[in-house]
Amino acid sequence: MSDYYADRYPQSVDAEIWLLGGILQDPKVLGEVSLILRNGTEFYHEKNQAVWNAMVALYSDGKQIDVLTVADILEKNGKLAQVGGKDYIFSLMESVPSAASVEYYAEMIRGKYILRSLISSSNETIKESLAPAAIPAETLQSAEKRIFDLSTDQVKENAVLAGDLAKDVVNILASRKHGQLSGCPTGFQEINSLTNGLQKSDLIILAARPSMGKTALAINIATNAAMLGKTVLFFSLEMNAQQLVERILSSTARVNLSDLRHGKIYSETPKILIAKANELAENPLYIDDSSEVRAFDLLSKCRVFKRKHNNNLDLVVVDYLQMMKVRGDAENRAVGVAENSRMLKVLAKELQVPVMALAQLNRNVENRPVSGGRPQLSDLRDSGSIEQDADMVWFIHRPIVEKLKKKKGDDYAPVEPDEKEKRQAFLIVAKHRNGPTAEIELEFHGEFTTFKDHMRTSISPPADAGGFEGNYDD
């Protein structure tokens, strides 16, 4: 802060004095005040900050807070003389008649602290903006994060003692019941068994060639999660919200999507659709169909959404990765897609939410007749870094689609596929950072744009996730 602003720096030393005096009058109020003032940095005057820290230390240890005990803590910390000795602590207690207004004083102190922090943040933004190599998008992202951290009390020391964290983890693990998912449910038994639900901070890439059903599976998972009370935010960069809702209603009501779009409405159809629409309205599935969206736009939208919905956000779906706008000055499209992929991982980690991003595969998969068109990690389109950023990579493989795509030779004899062949689908988990890879058989009901558990799964109990056989990814 420059000298010009030093004498007008936002502060209220009087409120600090009256707050500390009120706590000395009635120490029990410190518990309530500590919910407003998270740490001593909100205090402008150093000696008031030192007294506050001494009070908090006594309160945490369950000890009495009075002039003598506060003075004793300050003396042990070598700060008693710095604050003005016992006389200053006595003067604090005599500054107010009671503790009646301590919360009001705390709000005043907090408000001045926020203003000082905004000034500091603005200075950082100015400094970054004036740098010769400043990148507008990155500078804006950095500025926004500082403001977001301030508004959600996330400015804190990130380093934690592993041993302390381990105790919390053990408590969480011990509280889990057998069969209880630790992550967001997908509505598919074998997927849940393999992943134990979609885990917070994970980036899941769901990839396939066109017409395989990427969007259908993503919508199914999003709808299933919402129906179980999970808050889901679905970014549709390709279809508008109305088209997505048509698919959801077709899927949940088991009404042929083509019939809906062509106006073939039967007598019972409106009643069924209204019932499903009412059910959908009661569940927290949100759709954002903004186009021309950049990665840091998604991060901003998710931050605002989570804050607006009382910190509730259980799953983010992005349809799809290659449709996201890339940075204009990126060296090439692959670099731009790689940056977007990394930003989605940042989103997942920062907001502690699983992010499922749909992605296209390149044409190489169609040029491998020996494999029957089964995708592999090298088929991810535009950027190899997608695989690196992802915690899981899923592929959809439907043999019948690849079979019908093949060129018809002279000896080609068309044979109508049977119902089983039409519905056969596989979810190939090609990468799983924290678990086994596997191949899960599903059923695809194209007329309803719906994936379902395979019949053998739906009639048997869920597999024990601990016994799922597969290869673990390093």
Image (spheres, helix red, strand yellow):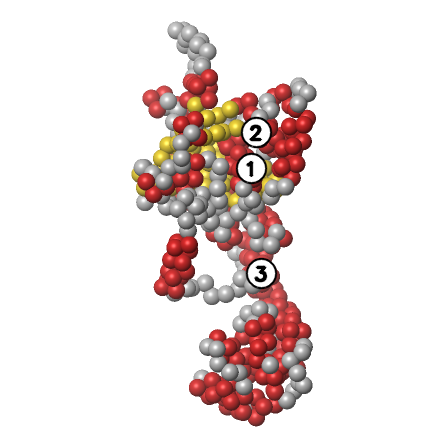
- Residue occupying the far bottom of the picture: 87
The residue under label 3 is which amino acid type?
Answer: Thr
Between residue 411 and residue 416, name the one nearer to us. Answer: 416
Between residue 289 and residue 219, name the one nearer to us. Answer: 219
How far apart are labels 2 and 3 at the CA level?
Answer: 38 Å
The x, y position of residue 408, in whole percent, is 43, 11
Circles 1 and 2, Cβ within 8 Å, touching? The answer is: yes
Residue 259, relative to residue 68: is it above or below? above
The residue under label 2 is which amino acid type?
Answer: Ser
Residue 280, relative to residue 9: is it above or below? above
Residue 386 quadrant = top left
Describe the element under mark 1 as helix, strand or loop. helix
Circle on res. 223: 1
Residue 244 quadrant = top right
Describe the element under mark 3 as helix, strand or loop. loop
Residue drawn at x 57%, y 80% as measured from the top left:
27
Describe the element under mark 2 as helix, strand or loop. helix
| Mark 3 residue crowding within 10 angstroms, few (<14) / some (14–19) / many (20+) | few
The x, y position of residue 295, in whole percent, is 54, 46
Count how many numbered circles sit on residues in the image: 3
Circles 2 and 3, Cβ within 8 Å, touching? The answer is: no
Residue drawn at x 46%, y 19% as measured from the top left:
422
Residue 426 quadrant = top left
Between residue 181 and residue 389, name the one nearer to us. Answer: 181
Residue drawn at x 57%, y 93% as measured from the top left:
87
According to the image, label 2 marks what residue?
251
Circle on res. 152: 3
Between residue 72 and residue 241, name the one nearer to us. Answer: 72
Looking at the image, is mark 3 or mark 1 earlier in the sequence? 3
| Mark 1 residue crowding within 10 angstroms, few (<14) / some (14–19) / many (20+) | many
Circle on res. 243: none
